[in-house]
Image: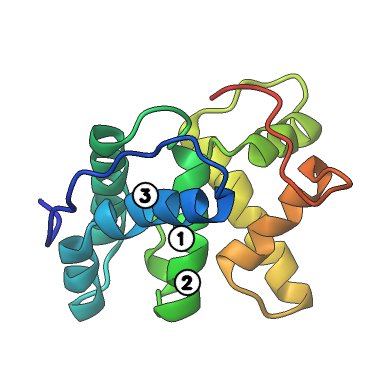
């Protein structure tokens, strides 16, 4: 499924305005690559298949528009924003970007001697959400954000020490 629009080409240039650069990067990986058509279909008839198709299409689109680390971490950031303005049925969340740096550290802490499959990683994230949601009502992004605190540096920036 193709996105509902195709963004115009933009060049991210190094300049002194890091805020402007960050906003442009968010627009590239969010507005231009997020599969609006898939999400519109999902909103009309939420399903696990449409959810996963939207996420796979997003990854495909963002990779065709950007280079570098625009991958699972940036999809997670886009989902954080999407959850703030859209309603998603938790029961239809059938895939999540499992390769965020903090998540990988979480897997190692929980299963130090195992190499987890993508499905097993997704189940770990689901179990994390379910357990935290029992204690206090929260969204999936809110629950999974708790794993990121171990990766935060004193200056409040996420420490990405290994490439993905």
Q: Which residue is mark 2?
A: 83
Q: Which type of secondary structure does the marked residue at label 3 adopt?
A: helix
Measure the alpha-carbon separation of dots 2 and 1: 6 Å
Residue 76 location, x and y as percent? Answer: 50, 52
Residue 37 location, x and y as percent? Answer: 15, 64
Circles 2 and 1: CB atoms closer than 8 Å: yes
Point 53% across, 25% down: residue: 164
Camera-side residue of 14 and 152: 14
Circle 3 crowding by C-alpha within 10 Å: few under 14, some 14–19, many from 20: many
Circle 1 crowding by C-alpha within 10 Å: few under 14, some 14–19, many from 20: many
Q: Is residue 150 above or below residue 114?
A: below
Q: Is residue 90 left or right of residue 104?
A: left
Residue 150 location, x and y as percent? Answer: 82, 44
Q: Is residue 19 left or right of residue 67?
A: right
Point 30% across, 41% down: residue: 62
Q: Which type of secondary structure does the marked residue at label 2 adopt?
A: helix
Q: Is residue 17 above or below residue 101?
A: below
Q: Which residue is mark 1?
A: 79
Point 67% across, 63% down: residue: 143
Between disc 3 and disc 2, whose residue precedes?
3
Q: Mark 3, mark 1: which one is toward the viewer?
A: 3
Q: Which residue is mark 3?
A: 29
Q: Is residue 116 above or below residue 90?
A: above
């Amino acid at each position: 499924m193709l996105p509902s629009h195709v963004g115009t080409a933009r060049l991210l240039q190094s300049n002194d305005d890091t805020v402007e650069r960050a906003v442009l990067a968010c627009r590239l990986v969010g507005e231009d690559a997020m599969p609006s058509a898939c999400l519109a279909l999902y909103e009309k008839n939420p399903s696990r298949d449409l959810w996963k198709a939207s996420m796979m299409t997003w990854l495909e689109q963002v990779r065709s528009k950007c280079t570098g680390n625009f991958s699972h971490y940036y999809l997670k950031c886009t989902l954080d924003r999407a959850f703030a303005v859209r309603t998603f049925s938790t029961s239809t969340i059938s895939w999540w970007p499992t390769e965020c740096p903090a998540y990988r550290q979480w897997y190692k802490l929980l299963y130090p001697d195992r190499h987890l499959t993508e499905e097993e990683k997704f189940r770990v994230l689901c179990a994390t959400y379910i357990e935290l949601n029992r204690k206090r009502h929260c969204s999936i992004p809110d629950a999974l954000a708790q794993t990121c605190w171990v990766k935060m540096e004193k200056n409040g920036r996420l420490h990405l020490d290994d490439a993905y």
